[in-house]
Amino acid sequence: MMEKMIFGRYVPADSMIHKMDPRSKLTIIFLFVCIIFIANNWLTYTIIGVYTFLMIGLSRIPIRFLYGGLKPVLWLVAFTFLLQLFFTREGTVVVDWGFVKIYAEGIKMGFYISFRFFFLILMTSLLTLTTTPIEITDGLESLLNPLKKLRFPVHEMALMMSISLRFIPTLMQETDKIMKAQIARGVEFASGPLMERIKAIIPLLIPLFVSSFKRAEELAIAMEARGYRGGEGRTKYRQLSWKTVDTLQLAFLAVVTIMLIYFRS
């Protein structure tokens, strides 16, 4: 499980995307989430797809590695497609099986929404794969720095996000250990009636929650023992540096946005 887990996992590599400033990567992800809703036809979704896979190519993250890590969420993409397929009642009827009718607009919207969901997952995964949690924290804190004038706890929020990303692989590893221990005791997670499989999850969740609370308490005690008092007066060992590649990437995204607006139906 841990070998295939990609959410919250950092993969070191010598690539253009890895060397970018975390502030530019966070800005690009935020803008990407906004502009993907501009796409509403095959040409605009093709542009989004080309841009997404170009970013993956520049990151030097193997496609096979991404596919293996995204397997658990692909069923969500398929479920989204089926929802649009069976519940969209517009356009001409393509399939008529009595109580089941599939419309042309349902097929089209199913593909559109599924592609949108899939590209969003790829881009957000690319952020964590090419950026360490510390860099994400520093970048997020720098971007939200103006909110400090409104007494918004910027440092604390950035720290919470960083800790959350950091402990996702740890929680998955803990889940894997508990599952193996339960399977050794005869628990069946993948076979039997549905209700039995649901009941089998309860012995998995309880020790996982107990372990998570214990780990959070240990982390809080460790931070308090080291004199942690928030972001007030703190200095940074790593200084963020905006490079030419960051400006070029934002300019490239601006060009993609203009193309989406121009070719939008």
Image (cartoon, helix red, strand yellow):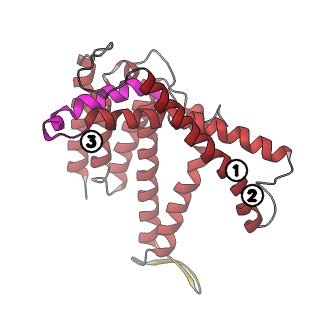
Q: Are marks 2 and 1 in contact (CB under 8 Å)?
A: yes
Q: Is residue 210 visible?
A: yes
Q: Is residue 36 above or below residue 246?
A: below
- The crowding category of the residue bearing disc 3, from other C-alpha atoms within 10 Å (few below 14, some 14 to 19, many at least 20), is some
User: According to the image, label 3 marks what residue?
Assistant: 31
Q: Residue furthest top?
A: 237
- Disc 3, SS: helix
In this rendering, would 78 be left or right of 42?
A: right
User: According to the image, label 1 marks what residue?
Assistant: 204
134 drawn magenta: yes
Q: Is residue 55 above or below residue 180?
A: above
Depth order, front residue of 117/194 = 194
- Disc 1, SS: helix
Q: Is residue 6 visible?
A: no
Depth order, front residue of 51/123 = 123
- Determine the CA span between mark 2 and mark 1: 7 Å
Q: Quadrant of the C terminus?
A: bottom left
Q: Residue furthest left?
A: 149
Amino acid type, label 3:
Leu
**x and y percent of residue 48 in the render?**
36, 44
Label 3 vs label 1, nearer the camera = 1
The magenta segment is 129-153
Amino acid type, label 1:
Leu
